Image (tube, rainbow, N blue to C red):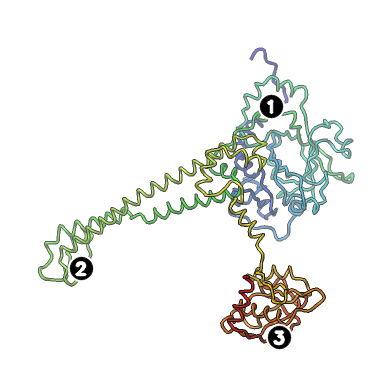
Amino acid sequence: MPNSPAIPRFFQDLAPQWARLGLWQKKLTVVFDRLRNSTVQKISASDEGFVILNLYKPGAAREPALISIQRTGSGISFSSAKPTSQNKPNSIVQMGRKYLQGRRIEQVLLCLDPLAVIIEFAPPGGKLLEELEWTADSPNCLVIDLDSRPARVCVATKHTCVPSRYEDQCSGFESGGDFYESHCEWSLENTKTKRRATFTHPLVTSCIVGGESIATEKILADSKAAKTLEQEPGRTHLAEPEAPESSETIIPAAADSQKFELIKPSVAPQPEMNLQFALNLLPTHVRRAARTRLQFFERRLQRQKTDLPVASVMDNLKRRAEGLRAHIYMWPKDFPQWHVPPEIIESAGLPAILTLKHGQSPGDLVTAAFDELDKLARRRSELEKRIEESRLALERFADQIIQAGADIFALPEEVRSSRLALARDVQHLVTVQRILTQLEVSWSPVGEKQSAMEAERERRLPYRSFRASSGEFIRVSKSAADADAMLKLMPAHHTWVHVMTGEGSHVWLEKPKGAKPSDAALREAAMLAIHHSKQTRAQEADVYVALRADLDKRKDLPPGKVIVRRSEHRFVRYSQMELQAFMEKQGS
């Protein structure tokens, strides 16, 4: 390009690093996509040189992320085989558990020179914020230096500018760049992790990994970007906290990512719309129902393949049937057994001795062999058709989910981030409605029918009401759980009645204001307690009569069980006519 300005010397010096960065980006793209937006549930380390991050991400596999600082094979990977953790956690683990555990990974950066990875964590919130006593100077990122020999991992704090306590030591660097303040370091040569992290030359922040690979030629040919680099080669720094005069000199260590917009994708790359990504776009209850349906299809397909007759077994059976038909003339007349010649055993696969059952002829054996062969052939043909139908049904349902995910992802970001807006705007999506119809679920977590049932359950009283002949209310619980709910409603001075032996309903007898319950009301309450118990056929039983204040309902007791601290005992006997007369009064 004759009219383009010369490529800056700074950019030319980093040309080998650009090529290496592109290779590392291809290697770590999938790993970084899994790290991003994951929550760190536990941080640990192993003596083999691994920092272990137990992560949780909805819809992702529960595999720990391993940060390796070994002399060979350093980097980040996911593995189902978890190394053995240290018996006593080192400083990296202690500081990570204090400040980083339980937080979400907000961003992952791949850095240029030296090659390093920066894992940035989102600020804590809610209860975690109170427990951490989090401040702006608290650690919020992990730095993995892959160029160091051996590799090392650091817990650091990212500042948007140089802190005032470092202004004198870092006065030669631009104050607007990102500044990383380290707290501790761990490598195979530094097992005590007391040394602070320093770098011997600037560390240039490159780009967010997860898009397309870096095109070095395009970057070098961008004249506008070259001018920007020539005029303002920004830097950020990584430094250790203030220490005594004997500590190491603070060395600059990172570059301003804002000055390197040319190497960041101008447009966010479109994620690949696969089944897993589409499922994650659905609400939780719809995603679970869809996964259940997918598992049903997969298990049915696997079961049908297992039941499919094996072709080798059918070939052997066919060879035996044809061999028996070809040599049946050699069967001795009027003999129930045939000792098959060795050459026929080898050629036709027949057993050494064939025996006839009572009333059976040699021709029946041939017919039975071919009947069994035909039966297996028909079953194999039928199962092959079913397997093809199941496979097509699985593919169709998966395609419908992917199409629905693509339609949801096509909605504006503000709609997808708002649950109410998404529920409103998704109604016109035919693909989503088709999935909801197949799964027999609604878009909202609780359908209208279920909401009505829950509302009816909330309005439902836990007891049946009766009126005593003297005017008091008598309430009888409907179930054990309703008995606990009814006891919560009972005032402490009201009367409680229950049979002494066996299971039965709890009875609540209202106490008149300023008076005691009448004997007639107590008898009718006891009669209802017996009638709604296992003594209903005997129509007589001993009953407890106590105040609500004398009952103790503990949390460890099962539903319907109470502890009676003080009570009276009464024996009550009644007739069927008396019970019917009382019930007729309730109806009138």
Looking at the image, is mark 2 or mark 1 earlier in the sequence?
Answer: 1
- Outermost residue on the front side: it is 588
Q: Which residue is mark 2?
A: 353
Q: Which residue is mark 1?
A: 262
- Image coordinates for residue 488, horizontal then vertical, percent: 73, 68
Q: Which mark is residue 569?
A: 3
- Image coordinates for residue 499, horizontal then vertical, percent: 65, 81
- Front-most of residues 299 and 221: 299
Pointer 3: residues within 10 angstroms few (<14), some, or many (20+)? some
- Front-most of residues 334 and 378: 378
Looking at the image, is mark 3 or mark 1 earlier in the sequence?
Answer: 1
Q: Which mark is residue 82?
A: none
In this rendering, would 406 be left or right of 374?
A: right
Looking at the image, is mark 3 or mark 2 earlier in the sequence?
Answer: 2
For image coordinates 74% across by 46% down, the residue present is 154
- Image coordinates for residue 159, horizontal then vertical, percent: 80, 39
Q: CA distance from mark 3 to mark 2?
A: 84 Å
For image coordinates 59% across by 39% down, the residue present is 426
Amino acid type assigned to the residue bearing label 2 in the image:
Ile
Q: Quadrant of the C terminus?
A: bottom right
Amino acid type assigned to the residue bearing label 3 in the image:
His
In the rendered image, the vertical position of residue 68 relative to residue 159, given as above or below: below
